[in-house]
Image (spheres, coloured by chain):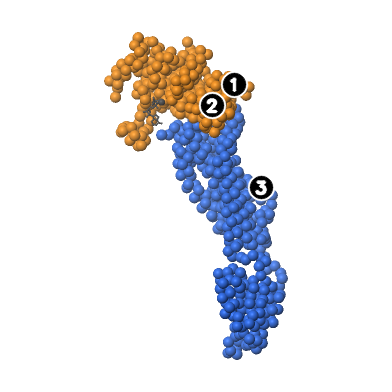
Chain colours: A blue, B orange
Amino acid sequence: MKQNGILAIMRKELARFFSDKRMVVSILLPGVLIYVMYSFMGQAMGSLYGVEEDYVPTVQVVQLPDSVVGLVETGGGLNLLEVDASAVAEAQSAVTDQTLDLLAVFPEDFDRAVAAYTPAGGQPAPNVELYYNAASTASQSAYMLLTSLLDGYEAQLANKFDINAGDKIYDLATEEDTAGTYFASLMPLLLMIFLYSGCVAVAPESIAGEKERGTIATMLITPIRRGDIAIGKILALALIALLSGASSAIGTVLALPKLMGAASDGLSANIYGVQDYLLLAAVILSTVVLLVTLISILSAFAKTVKEAQAYVMPLMILVMVLGVTAMFGGGAKTELWYYLIPLYNSVQCMVGVFSFSTVMAGVATALAANVIYTILGIFVLARMFNSEKIVFSR
Amino acid sequence: MRELLQVQGLTKTFRLSAKQQKLEKTREKVRVAVDNLSFTAYEGEIFGLLGPNGAGKTTTLRMLATLIRPDSGDAILDGASVVREPEKVRSKIGFLTSELKLEECFTPNYLFDFFSTLHGVPVEVRRQRKEALFARFGIDRYAEVKVADLSTGMKQKVSLVVSIVHDPDIIIFDEPTNGLDVLTARVVTDFLQELRSQGKTIIVSTHIFSLVEKLCDRVGILINGRMVCCDTLDQIRQGESLEDRFFTIYQETAGDGE
Ligand SMILES: Nc1ncnc2c1ncn2[C@@H]1O[C@H](COP(=O)(O)OP(=O)(O)OP(=O)(O)O)[C@@H](O)[C@H]1O
Ligand SMILES: [Mg+2]
């Protein structure tokens, strides 16, 4: 009978959820929206700051020196076109109109002037004029490319010492460290928000909604235990919240590379192993169940779904603040007592997993603490179901 | 006759919220909704609680159904105390009021099964009972229609059927015909009489005199939370119509009350 009751309540909650198409859509939509939005943002940023990869800017050059021809040949990426000095004005207006990418005017006999020049000689250095258009990304990238080629050429002429000239790897951070640090600062906040949103989409509806519609009393006159109602509801709601959280998380993971563009090279979630994912799953599971329990209790105080949504607002702020703490302080906390603080312990566990600094005893403490908090919460909720002040408040 | 329900000194007070005080234009902080109420109902009878609005009928029935706890006193239903053994009481009674709603997104078929499970009814018994009750009330044609799409009358029939999935010996019914058209009301009253003939004990509350005269074997008149008289219908009527008797009694009590 006991098992049956919990199961019946769970099945009813799930059936109610899946029979309401609007509800299902509202749960799964965030993931799709996040994917579309992030992809769109990534693309918009890409087209704002980059040019198409195979585009070669055209540069009109007055008095093109041989050295520069050689430089561009090895450096590449520019299409040089020698023009006469009389064409300068015309070329300048072409740059303004964005029909030409860049105009470079070299002094006469540039190579010889450069070779003859000494900084101590008192004469001004030979000057190269580069006319570009900052409003055009192609022009700007051509300008930067040629500037860096010429800078390199200048440095090479007066070479006194080099920095990192060899072809060794100088950045000693492993690919894992870089990606791990990145994920650890961002993912806990995102995950906490997703999980919270998932819970808040279903729990007030199920608890305060049943009060509002007067359907909970119909259940309360049957011999089923109040605890069974609480457990059945919390398990079902947690399952749905997980589904919604998963939808959002998958949307994010798929869209992240697009959002980060080129910066995401080597930023792959493949760096995590099965054990990491299992740990994460356990942490997420215990977090969702606890969150659903907390939100259910808050909702039980409310008479209507609207009221319940107001009551849970402070919890959302708390969750976000706790999520943000993941961005500060390197790695997971090692002191165990931190892992006793509900919700903060979830963030710490996630930081640990993502940054490869998991404190196993901490995770174990957090999981055990969350289970205990959840059981306490279920007792509280069951008592509330038994309280006429809560169920029949006027 | 066996005493199936013994109500002993039931009392219930409510704390009035500031909002409620304003709404009812009263300064009193507590409202005695039910005041030291005692009565007995016998096996196989229909007992009627008759009283005007706010008399405490619903509050009394909610205490009998263990939805709210009495401040003091107790009620024993077929040997089970509402104070000490609420779960046992719940398995013995069927409780129906218009405030207890069914979830609109489910079908009568689903709800019958769901509540049968909560009551621990075996699957085979459930199947037979459902078939019989659905046929009896013409629900079978609507068995797979969502409650939201049913007419008020059909909804009420489904609520009635769902409240007795466990075939209880005691049926408690708050305002059984409220909001129903004459046809549906007739179906409900006929069914209550049918249940009585099966030996069930039925407690109904109402402010409708004709309903009491038609249905009830014994009546308790409730005014301001107090039972002013409780007897068989004929004893109370004393040859007059119930309505006339009620006004006489009401004037007598209102005179010495307040
Ligand atoms: N939860 C509550 N909080 C405060 N007061 C209440 C509550 N429930 C009932 N009351 C008050 O108790 C008194 C009795 O109410 P009850 O609903 O039992 O009357 P009733 O006989 O069923 O009336 P009606 O015919 O209007 O249904 C009323 O004055 C009502 O305002
Ligand atoms: Mg009433």
Q: Is mark 2 within 8 Å of ligand 1?
A: no
Q: Which residue is mark 2?
A: A223
Asked whether residue A48 is in view, the answer is yes
Helix, strand or loop for disc 2: loop
Q: How busy is the neighbourhood of tag 2: few (under 14 within 10 Å), some, or many (20 plus)?
A: some
Kindly report which numbered mark, 1 or 3, lies closer to the viewer in this rendering.
1
Q: Amino acid at mark 2?
A: Pro
The quadrant where ligand 2 appears is top left
* The residue carrying mark 1 has its beta carbon less than 8 Å from ligand 2: no
Report the front residue among B37 and B146.
B146
Instruction: Identify which residue, A292 or B193, lies in the foreground.
Output: B193
- Name the residue at the left extreme: B255
Q: Amino acid at mark 1?
A: Glu
Which residue has dot 3 on it?
A278
Disc 2 from disc 1: Cα separation: 23 Å
Q: Which residue is mark 1?
A: B131
Q: How far from the left and from the top, in percent, is residue A232?
A: 57, 35
**Which chain's residue wears label 3?**
A
Give the distance between the C-alpha atoms of the residues marked 3 and 2, in whole angstroms.
39 Å
Q: Amino acid at mark 3?
A: Leu
Report in which chain the residue with disc 1 lies.
Answer: B
Instruction: Say which quarter of the image contains residue A166.
Output: bottom right
> Would you place residue A213 above or below residue A168 in this image?
above
